[in-house]
Amino acid sequence: MTLSRRDLADVGVLIGCALRPKMRPGADSDYRTLLGRYRADTEFRTAVDSVLDGLDAQVLSDSDLGLVLGVRRESVFAYRVSDLPNVGGVSERLLVGLVSVAVAAYAFPTPADFDDDRVRWVSVDEIERFVRDMCDRLKRTPERTEREDESFDEAWRTFDRLSPGYKADRGKGKARRSPASSTYWVAHVLTWLADQRLARSAPARGPEAFQLLERFRVQAGELAGNATYDLLAAIRRGDHPSEEAP
């Protein structure tokens, strides 16, 4: 069977739905119908995959939560750290990148964890302490942590210089976090993940707790083999070499 113009239009509709993180098949009948067709109709699936390939993208998962897409760096749909609000300078982009990878390494410390769909929870304090501990380890073992990636070195040193607590703006009254606080950046990243439907707030689990959703697990799985993820994951597993090792 040859796909009709209507079929090709449906290919575009399905891809458009997948590119909207807040859309869910359960709440949109067209999305639900097209997702079912993607799973059952080989020709339709091939057409969707081919169009995505031309856009430097691919389907990572087609669960009941919708299509989860992954994109190559050169894709027009590739996520840029600078897309986050209030992230303009190089230091801010490095901090956001470091915290984002830290969330993945903390929740999924082995590549096999990315295939495990059990629920993961994180909090602002947990991630801040995790990155802070990583900074302390790297300061104690400089000869073991020399890296070709200068941006990573700059990122963790920038994080290490931040205050771990609140810093009140003068004259503002109630204390609140400022960009001079490491917890500000952790909270900023986790809140953005929730805005993108990669996580959801979970106040019942404690202050500033979040549940990581399947879309985050699937997309974060692309980090497996990334040097920064590998280092952070090793620290999370507890098998990063200590300064006492020979």
Image (cartoon, helix red, strand yellow):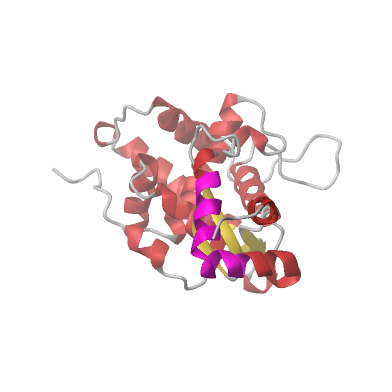
Quarter of the image where the N terminus is located: bottom right
- Residue 121 in picture, x, y percent from top left: 54, 66
Q: Nearer the viewer, residue 196 or 170?
A: 196
The residue located at (86%, 36%) in the rendering is: 171
Left or right: 22 in relation to 15:
right
Q: Is 51 within the magenta? A: yes
Location of the C terminus (image quadrant): top left
Q: Is residue 133 visible?
A: yes
- Magenta stretch: give its range: 35-52
Residue at screen point 55% across, 45% down: 51
Taking the image as shown, residue 13 lies to the left or right of residue 212, namely right
Q: What percent of the width, then of the height, locates residue 105? A: 42, 53
Residue drawn at (49%, 63%) of the image: 42
Query: Please, which residue is most extreme toward the left here?
Result: 246
Left-right relation of 228 to 53: left
Q: Nearer the viewer, residue 111 or 124?
A: 111
Q: Residue 142 versus residue 39: which sits nearer the camera?
A: 39
Q: Is residue 203 above or below residue 14?
A: below
Q: Where in the figure is residue 234, as x and y percent of width and height? A: 32, 52
Q: In this rendering, is residue 9 above or below 200?
A: above
Q: Residue at x 72, y 38 (%)?
A: 85
Report if residue 45 lies within the magenta region.
Answer: yes
**Residue 56 visible in this rendered orientation of the protein:** no
Seen from the viewer's position, the closer of residues 14 and 241 is 14
Where residue 122 appears, as percent x and y from the top left, is: 55, 62
Q: How many marks?
A: 0
Q: Main secondary structure of the magenta part?
A: helix
